Image (tube, rainbow, N blue to C red):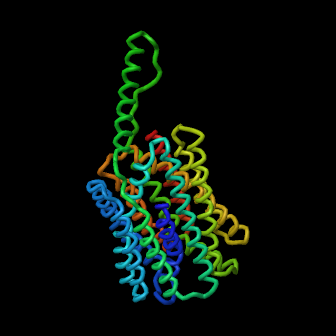
Amino acid sequence: MWRLGFFFHEMGFGLLSVFLPLYVMSETVQGSLVHIGILAATALFLAIPASFFWGYLCDRTKKYKRYILLSFVSSSIILYLFTMTTSISLLIVLYAVLSILHVAHEAPKNVLIAESYSRTDWERSFAFYEGFTETGWLIGLLLGFLLSISGTGATNTLYVVSALNLVAFALSTVLIADPALVFERGLVSIEKSIDFAYHGISLASRILDGERVNERLKRENINAFCIGLILFSLATSILFTPMPIFISNIAMTASLPASFVFAVFVLNSGGGVAGYFLAGIRSIQTVEKPNIGRVVIFRSFLALLLVLVLPTTTYQVALATGVLIMMGFAYALFLVYTLSLSMELIPAGKAGLFNVLIGVGGACGSYVGPFVAETFGFFWVFLSTGLIFLAAYFAFKIFA
């Protein structure tokens, strides 16, 4: 039940994710793709140290609820302040402050899940949480679609987003409780060290007995894992930051209504829900480590496939929609697998490191994506994204 607050929070930000780029480009604000990039990049760069800070603070104090509540109530207040200005400069400042406070709930949420379940249940638990909240995100997109076709103004739309975060705050105040004991991640770390030592002793014993051993004693390359996360996040951000504008452009070219943009992202979110459901099912059926590399190489293929969408016809619109659905599906699998691994690999006290790594790639990509799209065109956005996903694949191969 404690996840219910996050459900409404994701509803609000699902609506905002598509509405905000369109709002910046509207006649009211009169921004550009570069402004969208500056807005997103500034917010994400500032969120990087904030993620580490909130993660360190919650692990140090062993208090998690207070930071989740801070995130939700501050989001509600700042989104309300959005309605009081149409200045692009002030919107960028407000969104930057929003980003710093918004990430306060990320590390505490991850720790709550990790400490509430045993290691064997982490994939299923993360999959259930992400699938449940992604459903909220999807409903938020549907709500945005309905508000768009009904002609609801920008101010009223922002009121709705603010109200949803206020509901999230109220529900979390009642439903969330800090764990009585915090030890599961520490036990997992000890088990990994013992397993490594046992495997080393076993190999040494077999060698001394004269056996021919083809195995190697090899630790996981955590640096490669971190680089893979950054590259994956970079490619995702380059691709998706200007994506609402790209979908809006092809919708207009194909004489489709503006609400089509929300409809496409609803389907993209639906693919994510399906991916989280599959991740939960697989965690029950197998205990083997998931093949992250296959998911990443699939995203690379999908990004390169978008190059075929550029000569816009009805067929290309359908292809773009299908690619985005599969993108959402693949991202869901990737997030569940890497979140579970990060809780295993990242020591206590550094719970925010996962969000820091994702934030580094996201911050860089959120500026690069709109800049490349406006300066060189979407062809180079899709091509560069596919190649960066490919580089991430090799990083995860080294990690494993």
Counting from the top left corner in percent of width and height, residue 212 is at 46, 14
Counting from the top left corner in percent of width and height, residue 125 is at 50, 51
Of residues 220 and 75, the one nearer the viewer is: 75
Q: Residue furthest right?
A: 315
- Return the x and y of residue 150 as percentages of the image width and height: 63, 86
Q: Is residue 1 left or right of residue 66?
A: right
Nearer-the-camera pick, 149 or 214: 149
Left or right for 64, reference 127 = left
Q: Residue at x 49, y 52 (%)?
A: 126
Q: Nearer the viewer, residue 140 or 367?
A: 140
Residue at the outermost top position: 210
**Residue 360 is drawn in which quadrant?**
bottom left
- Count of picture labels: 0
Between 318 and 1, the one lying in front of the other is: 1
Q: Examine the rendered structure and indicate whether residue 188 appears above or below residue 316.
A: above
Instruction: Return the x and y of residue 83 as percentages of the image width and height.
Output: 43, 87
Asked where in the image residue 184 lies, by quadrant, the reply is top left
Give me the residue at 40% from left, 71% from top: 72
Relative to residue 188, is residue 60 depicted above or below?
below
Q: Residue at x 37, y 53 (%)?
A: 179
Would you say 38 lies left or right of 125 here? left
